Amino acid sequence: MDALARFLGRASRLPALPDAIIRLLQVADNTSSTADDLARVIEIDSVLSTRLLRLANSVFYGMRGHVSTVKHAVVILGHKTIRSMALVLWTHATANVPLEQRPLERLQREMFLHGLATATAARMLASLTAPELTEDIFAAGLLHDIGRVALVCELQQAYEGRVLRQAASENRSPAELERELLGFDHAQLGAALLTSFHLPDLLVQVTADHLADEISLARPGLACVVLANSMAAEMGHRIAGISPPLFTEVRREFGLEETDCHEAFLQECKDRIQLLLAELAWPTTANAP
Amino acid sequence: MEPLVVLSDVHGNLEALEAVLARVADLGPSRVYSLGDTVGYGPNPVECLRLARQRFELLLMGNHELGAIRPSMFTFNHEADVALRWTRERLREAGEIDGLEELQITHLEGDMLFAHGSVRHPVTDYIQETNGWGLSTFDDIVQQLERDFTGFRICFVGHNHKPFLATREGFIHPHEGVSEFCVTDEKLYVCVGSVGQPRDDDPRACFVVYDGEKVQYHRVEYPVEQTAAKIRAQPLPPILAERLLLGY
């Protein structure tokens, strides 16, 4: 865990996608924007969400470990603080970073879409099993791979070559290769990051355990996110072509065992993602500028 | 600790200062510290300075007081320069100019440092969120907090006329929903805003109360039209009246 602790210090400053920040600045600059408008732009991006949840859970607001959704964070932080944070992220992502040192934007976009697809599917699954936790589970879905975002930002091409490509060519799990290379995997790193940011337990635990081989509805948050992670890959939002297990048994428990139900569920999920992206004028493919 | 009122940048605005002192009397704290710029811009520098000497336990030197006693030391913008020349004459007539020499530059008390500008230059430096290129100054602030905050943990400043906390987590602004912040154990700047010339798009006078654990921002309405009318009645730049009405 020493390796993890050493990495943690460097990885606490995650760069967001520049266009995500620009959209946030545009909405924040408009004085007639509402808290809902701000939340809509923030909550589709895992890095923006993590940064604002971190601030809302900081000691200053006296709510450590209690703010789990972006909507709640927006209400607590207010317009000016969010705009200021967007400017900090913009400065970190672009102005102070030479082009050759910026993270791999294509992979960042893949992770953005994977996070959004997982969050959207997790929210739909949560509405079937744990409706009271719908928004918390959406946030957990969005943040589950935050450790991978940190790894890509820190290791860049080395992560793509020595973890993702090697995993695909050897048919091994990326997490296994991460542990070989670094001594920890992205789930452990993500959970350690979220813990250091004092985020609520649900978000930390789901992130820590999202690589589980077995899941059950006894932990609805984890079950929704792990299954959603699998569904995101089915919808085409996989990282470097890697697909997680299908969890057929658990799908049955959600009432999605029939092919028709399953297809309809995925289609609705895709439609919701498209709608979200279209509303925010986001490019809908990983390679779009 | 006993609650402490910290305010700054009264800038000769007697109506705002009296409204703030009335609110302080309602709230209860007896100690009031001022971080400087009691004079400059506004129409009642002498009255504000005298009231400040009478009511404040600490009165620091701001760049406008320093400009009044050392005119050649600074280059002010046109409006500030015109106002400062006028202010200097009013203070001289009232016999108040020499007393400005005695104002403290900083005050250290427990883990608190009080200054007008910043740790790096207590009178003239600004704590700002962005630099001249519109980029965030966050990294510079974090560097200051980590390297320069030794022997104290929390630094109260004015000068920028804006209420916010500059912390290692980011810049934190009070708003209608949340105006109280826990500040235990963290190094930070507390920018207390301005009593007499707020510049955060809110014309109400601003000050903070600190009780050793929490910083609470307060906003107070005052008859700003009255102050603006007084400015217009003097040979002061009319823009100084307009900006009070809008808070910029």
Image (spheres, helix red, strand yellow):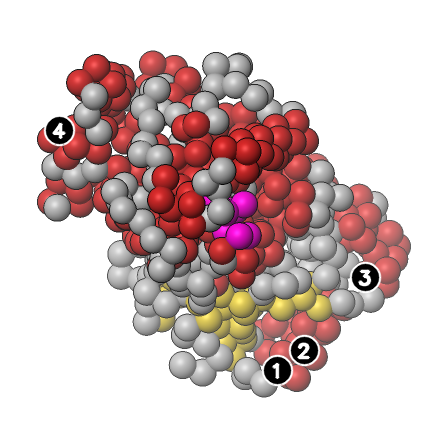
Q: CA distance from mark 2 to mark 1?
A: 6 Å
Viewer-nearest residue: A147 or A219:
A219
Amino acid type at circle 1 is: Leu
Q: CA distance from mark 4 to mark 1?
A: 60 Å
Q: Is residue B185 left or right of residue A284?
A: left
Viewer-nearest residue: B3 or B47:
B3
User: Which one is in front in this view, the residue at disc 4 or the one at disc 3?
Assistant: 4
Q: Which picture quadrant has residue A173?
A: top left
- Extent of the magenta region: A122-128
Viewer-nearest residue: B71 or A191:
A191
Chain of residue at mark 2: B
Mark 3, secondary structure of its residue: helix
The local crowd at label 2, few if under 14, some if 14 to 19, many if 20 or more residues have their Cα within 10 Å, is some
The local crowd at label 1, few if under 14, some if 14 to 19, many if 20 or more residues have their Cα within 10 Å, is few
Q: Which mark is residue A181?
A: 4
Chain of residue at mark 1: B
Q: Same chain for labels 2 and 1? Say yes or no.
A: yes
Q: Which mark is residue B224?
A: 3
Query: Could you tell me which quadrant the N terminus of chain B lies in?
Result: bottom left
